[in-house]
Amino acid sequence: MTDWLIPDWPAPAGIKACVTTRAGGVSAAPFDSFNLGDHVDDDPLAVARNRSTLTSRLQVEPAWLKQVHGIDVVEATPAEVMQADASWSRTPGIACTIMTADCLPALFCNRQGTQVAAAHAGWRGLAAGVLEAAVDSFDDAPSEILVWLGPAIGPQAFEVGPEVREAFMATHPQTANAFVPGANPGKFMADIYQLARARLAAHGVTAVYGGGLSTYNDERFFSYRRGARTGRFASLVWIEQ
């Protein structure tokens, strides 16, 4: 699978996950080459070929979403593209699928291996509670949920304004340490991984893995801040058939 990532987390047997990279597709620059986003002005035929390659390589049916930086969670349905920022599934062979290019992709499963979920968390969705909403899609207690945090913008590249810090601090004052003053007056450098872990811990989820990559610095991944006209990579989680 070229240089695609396989998450390193203690998921139960039968739970599979994968993160694609820029490599291995047919899209031309600046979407080169494995762009999966159909909303970024790439050639639709190239996107369709890349998505077909994804499906055949993984032998799953990705359930694509129209992501809007909200907190809605839907059941993953490959036949319909729904507007939401998280999905869940208990059906083997259907992959909860998130597209990102700096935002945080989070993958979830329960310890029994009977349900999976995936969430797209930019700072707005993260502050509004999209990770908590994904956890709540499980019948299990939060302590029974495992989470893997995929490639996102790193803390050295994620400059935000004071309104972002205030959005988190208003409900979770313990997130103060996730913001450090930036080089520009009034700005902060935010650690999206630390923010996610703090929010999940406050919701009772402590089995959190992954993190530490930076889409901005790691050119294996698309990055909106590195080049605004860019593609999207996918993070998927599913129950094996």
Image: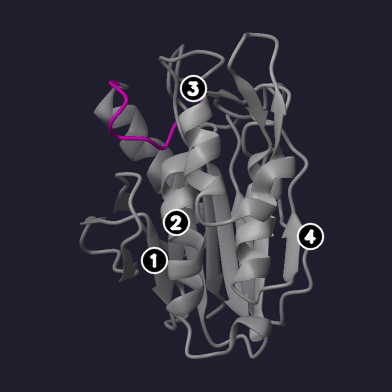
Residue 215 percent across, percent down from the top left: 64, 29
The foreground one among 107 and 203 is: 203
Circle on res. 87? 1
- Residue visible at 41% across and 54% down? 128
Residue 98 percent across, percent down from the top left: 45, 51
Mark 4 or mark 3: name the one nearer the start of the chain. 4
Is 119 rendered above or below residue 77? above
Q: Which residue is mark 2?
A: 97
State yes or no: discs 2 and 1 in contact (Cβ < 8 Å): yes
In this rendering, which labeled residue sits more in front, label 2 or label 1?
Answer: 1
Q: Amino acid at mark 2?
A: Thr
Q: CA distance from mark 1 to mark 4?
A: 21 Å
Indicate the secondary structure of the residue bearing disc 2.
Answer: strand
Q: CA distance from mark 3 to mark 2?
A: 19 Å
Indicate the secondary structure of the residue bearing disc 1.
Answer: strand
Residue 85 percent across, percent down from the top left: 36, 54
Circle on res. 8? 4
Q: Would you call the spot at circle 2 few (<14 residues within 10 Å), some (14-19), or many (20 or more)?
A: many
The foreground one among 20 and 227 is: 227
Q: CA distance from mark 2 to mark 1?
A: 8 Å
